[in-house]
Amino acid sequence: MQTSQVTAIADARIPFEACPLCGVADAEEIGVASCTSHPLYRAELPPTIRWIRCDGCGHVFADGYFSDAALAIVFGNAHALQLPGRETLHGRGVAAKIVEDVSHARGRWEGRWLEVGFGSGALLTTAAEFGYDVVGLDLREQSVVKMRELGFDARRADLLACDEDAGFDVVSMADVLEHMPYPKPALVHARKLLRPGGALFLSMPNMDAFAWQELERQKKNPYWGELEHFHNFGRSRLHALLRETGFEPCRYGISQRYHACMEIVAKPVL
Ligand SMILES: [Zn+2]
C-alpha cells in the first residue's frame, strides 16, 4: 500500500510589511487562530492565521496573504456554496434584496452590473432577472465554466484586470474585499469602472457589530479561522476607506446570509 506524505509549501504567506490600508508599520498581534477545520484547508497550507491590529488606523489584518502557489491550492477546491448550479429559494431571495437595495439607492433598475467574485452566481442571475445586463468575474475556473454553460458573460479574472472604464452602473463585491490583499487599489479601480449615477455594493463581516461581539463572548467567532480572509473590517474603518477612495456610503444593511455581516451601498463622489 502506498502512503502519500503531504508537506507544507514554503512561504505560503507573503507578510504585509505595513498596514495594507494606511501604510503605518507599527502594529500589534492580537491573536492566533487555527484554520485547520476550514473546509478548504489542506495540509500544504499554514495551519494558523496570526491577526494584527494597525497602530495607525486600527485596521485588523492577517500577518500575510497567500502566494500564488498557496492560492492555487485554495482555488483548486471549492465548497458547494461557492459554486453555481445550486439555485435555491433562499439564495434568490437574499440576492433580490441586494438588487432592490442597490436599485433604490440609484433610483434606477437597469444598466450594466459587474459582479466581482460571483461564487454561486445567485446575485448575477438575480440581477439579470431584474433586467440588468450582467458580467461576472471569478477566480475559480469551474465556476466560470459553469456560468458560461448557463449562458452568462463570465470571465476568469480579478477586478484589476477589468479595463472597461466608466463601463458599469453597478459594481458588486459580495464577501470579496476581505479576500483581497490590498483593498484600497481595488476600490479605486471599482470607482474608475463606474459611470456617473452608479453604485458600489459591498458585504463582509462587521467587527463593530454587537453580533460580532456576541460571537466573541460565546467563543464561537468563525471569522478568525476563515482561511480565505486577510482582513476584518469594522463599519467605521470601511466607511473611512470608502471616503478615501472616492465614495460616499449611502445605505447600511445587515446580511441575510452570514452572522455579523454588513451590506453597504456607496456612490461615487463626483
Ligand atoms: Zn493602518
Image (cartoon, rainbow, N blue to C red):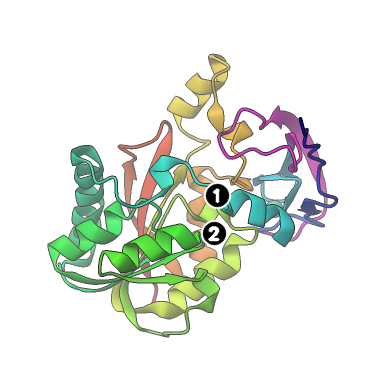
The residue type indicated by label 1 comes to Arg
Q: Are marks 1 and 2 in contact (CB under 8 Å)?
A: yes
Most extreme residue toward the right is 10
Residue at image location 67% in from the left, 30% down from the top: 36
How far from the left and from the top, in percent, is residue 32?
74, 30
Label 1 Cα neighbours within 10 Å, binned few <14 / some 14-19 / many ≥20: some
150 versus 174 height, above or below: below
Which residue is under mark 2?
A: 241
Residue at image location 48% in from the left, 45% down from the top: 235
Quadrant of res 53: top right
* Quadrant into which the C terminus falls: bottom left
The residue type indicated by label 2 comes to Leu
Query: Ligand 1 near label 2 (Cβ, under 8 Å)?
Result: no
Name the side, left or right, on which 18 lies relative to 21.
Answer: right
How far from the left and from the top, in percent, is residue 216?
56, 21
* Quadrant into which the N terminus falls: top right
How far from the left and from the top, in percent, is residue 195?
33, 80
Residue at image location 73% in from the left, 37% down from the top: 43
Most extreme residue toward the front is 1
**Helix, strand or loop under label 2:** helix
User: What stretch of residues is rendered in magenta?
Assistant: 22-48
How far from the left and from the top, in percent, is residue 64?
75, 50
Task: Answer yes or no: is residue 116 visible.
Answer: no
Quadrant of res 51: top right
103 versus 233 height, above or below: below
Name the side, left or right, on which 232 lies relative to 191.
Answer: right
Label 2 Cα neighbours within 10 Å, binned few <14 / some 14-19 / many ≥20: some
Which residue is under mark 1?
A: 237
Most extreme residue toward the top is 218
